Image (cartoon, rainbow, N blue to C red):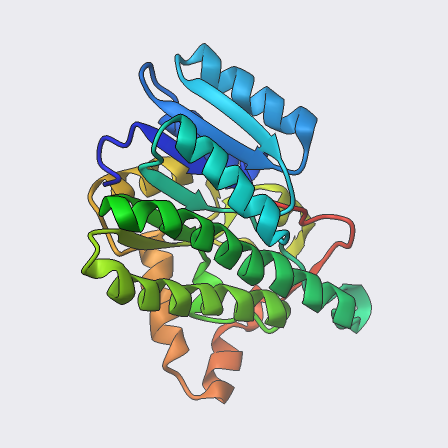
Amino acid sequence: MAHGAQHVAITGASRGIGAALARAYSAPGRRLALAGRDRSRLEAVAAACRAAGGEVTTDVFDVRDQEAAAAWFRKIDAAQPVDLLIANAGVFDGNGADGRWETAGEAQRLVEINVTGVINTVLAAQQAMRPRRTGRIAIISSLAAVLPAADAPTYSATKAALVAYADALRILLASENVGVSVVLPGHVRTRQTEAHVGALAMIMEADEAAAIIKRGLERGQAMIAFPRRAHWLVRLASILPWRLKALATRGDRFHVHKGGGGPG
């Protein structure tokens, strides 16, 4: 299970939370399989992890490519069985400045990477974990799944879909001893927040977020949501009638600086 995992696989490991998680899990005797789309950034993360004593492999591929995701997992699992998969790869986008709505192409990209990409990765992992009857799958969602952001409607929808997917998987895999965790971060200082033009309440650093996620996974938590105060505030706001919800969240309105929010 996640506690004491000896081989940890992380997608979207070239920056942001994924890179921070790679650093958090780096230790002598632990193997890391890092995947991303930016070769130079990924290798820089790998170098830092190796300096901390971890054994690291890197692979560059697009999680939207089901065959590539399956081939990646088969390869890393054959080298050493993967104990923990963290499906972190994702992108952020939303409405632009001056009232410009997100385009159909932007929305489609969000769905393909954030939802289909995660499903591709999980399908690859379960083929190896189920026969062994061991392992944990962690899916990185967002607090936007609980309280959708009006200015990032498709992003919010993709993150809500991941919560539903994780909840279904947890029940489906329970009898096969494969654990499933879903992670709901609030604002974390990453490339996503660089593209977010507006208030960023209770923002935290990526390394702090990674430490919280790692602790939660080691405890086998089904849901890891943080910051705790932000989680309870969005839960309370989510049950309000929509007009009150709009009033409660008006200070959180934002727009997206286009050209940011790349793969996490």
x then y, percent, for residue 45: 55, 24
Work out whether 253 lies above or below 140. Answer: below
Q: Is residue 259 left or right of residue 254?
A: right
- Count of numbered marks: 0
Q: Is residue 130 left or right of residue 34?
A: left
x then y, percent, for residue 16: 55, 38
Within the image, what quadrant is residue 14 found in? top right
Residue drawn at the location 51% of the way across and 24% of the way down: 57
Work out whether 169 lies above or below 12. Answer: below
**Residue 203 or 118: which is nearer the viewer?**
118
Residue drawn at the location 74% of the way across and 69% of the way down: 102
**Residue 167 or 18: which is nearer the viewer?**
167
Residue drawn at the location 64% of the way across and 27% of the way down: 41
Residue drawn at the location 45% of the way across and 57% of the way down: 141
Work out whether 236 lies above or below 189. Answer: below
Within the image, what quadrant is residue 78 found in? top left
x then y, percent, for residue 93: 67, 59
